[in-house]
Image (spheres, grey):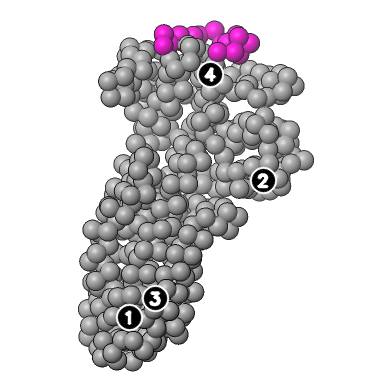
Amino acid sequence: MSSLLAEALAVAAKDLRTEFRTRVALNALGLFALTTLAAVSYTIGPYRIAEADRPYLLSALLWVVILFASLAGLDRTFVKEEESHTAPLLRLSAGPHAVWLGKLLFNLGLLAALMVILVPLFIVLMGLPLVLHFGWLVAVLAAGGFALAVITTIVAAIIARAMTRGALFAVLSLPLLLPLVIFAIQGTAGVASGEIEIVHQSLRAMISFGGIMVVVSAALFPVIWGE
Amino acid sequence: MGDGIRIEFSEVGKRYDERVIFRGISGTVKPGSILVLTGPNGSGKSTLVSILCGLLRPTRGTVKYLVGDDEVERWEWRFHLGIVAPAMALYEELTAHENLRFFARVRDLKMDDDDLNQILETVGLDPRRTTPVVGFSTGMQQRLKIAQAMLHEPEVLFLDEPGANLDPGGQDWFEGWVAAYAAAGGTVVLATNDRREMQWGMNRVELAG
């Protein structure tokens, strides 16, 4: 195993261990997602939307819940390092790319855990139709979740030392996340309505977008983290 | 410890917006010597330590790490230095052993549990190795910071008020340890206003405040 990957896994494992002992980010993500889902399913439910409108409206609702739950918790990975004054020692101990990759892996894990709980509940409570194979939905969620984690991780690093970090996280993240969320909604709607070509297009767009953000993040992070 | 590292800093200054913290600070720390930074509260001792260890960039001036005549690249400094400072905390949710294991892994050190326990024993924390740091006294946290700083046997050691919160026995042990470290060729930068610690080194930089 390469040194970079081993160091990144050490950072991710440390973050997972501390998170499971405090559950700050998990609680923020989980409570926001479940509360929103409960409110939406209680007021709208599976039957108040016309059948023809369901694929797009329910897909949009699903990604709105995922998006805002992410904004509620995915900044913690860097903010906590600054708030608890552990960031300086981490800067002097680990390489910047190992820190970035470790934090990204942690956020990916957090987002995956959220989706594993939220999406089946959403399908059951909201009646999201799945015309295409369930695997296509998993692919859309994975591609969208990956790009979402990449963007929120680098933005979290940028805002971690700011005074008004909560507001800044949303302000800086949303313009970057907007195109991603549109592709993710289209892809999910494609799975729900059986339009495989739309699914292919959205997957290509999300993977490209995520790939570009990985390259940009890897190039920018040492500068952001170092100063 | 190899040839040791010499730190040369020249005309170093730092300002935040309009506030000048210090300016025109120069000095050299040779392997085997201890440089003592003193000055009143707010004079910038910790800021200078952060600049010398690479955490902050100076507004003016230069800092160099040298092995003989060869300069060590700035991004490589972290491999060569250890630091104990009040502004740098360890992970409170992790145990003492987990903290050391984490820092060993991110530094890519091949250390097993016995090696880590040996270091904890050296700083007097072996009986509490499975206690989360949040349950430690400030003195015990200071001992763990010292263990973390010595983990990778660095050539340069930055100490910012190292004796703070240590009991008299711990202060005696640490004073002896730093003296042995410097005698073995280590380079030490010590920021302190403690009269006893100020006697550890012959070279002194006094910040005006």
Identify the mark at residue B180; answer none if there is no mark: none
Q: Mark 2 or mark 4, which has the lower sequence index?
A: 2
Q: Nearer the viewer, residue A37 or A205?
A: A37
- 3D distance between C-alphas at marks 2 and 1: 45 Å
Q: Amino acid at mark 4?
A: Leu
Quarter assignment of residue A41: bottom left
Identify the residue shown where x is 41% and y is 70%.
A36
Left or right side of B78 for B57? left
Residue B110 magenta-highlighted: no
Q: Nearer the viewer, mark 4 or mark 1?
A: 1
Image location (x, y in percent) of residue A165: 36, 46
Q: Which residues are magenta?
A: B193-209
Task: Give me the chain letter of mark 2.
Answer: B
Is residue B42 positioned above or below A126 on the image?
Answer: above
SS class of the residue under badge 1? Answer: helix
Q: Nearer the viewer, residue A103 or A188?
A: A188
Residue located beneath label 2 in the image: B132
Task: Give me the chain letter of mark 1.
Answer: A
- 3D distance between C-alphas at marks 3 and 1: 10 Å
Q: Amino acid at mark 3?
A: Val
- 3D distance between C-alphas at marks 2 and 3: 41 Å
Q: Outermost residue toward the front?
A: A43
Residue located beneath label 3 in the image: A40
Quarter assignment of residue B57: top left
Q: Mark 3 or mark 1, which has the lower sequence index?
A: 3
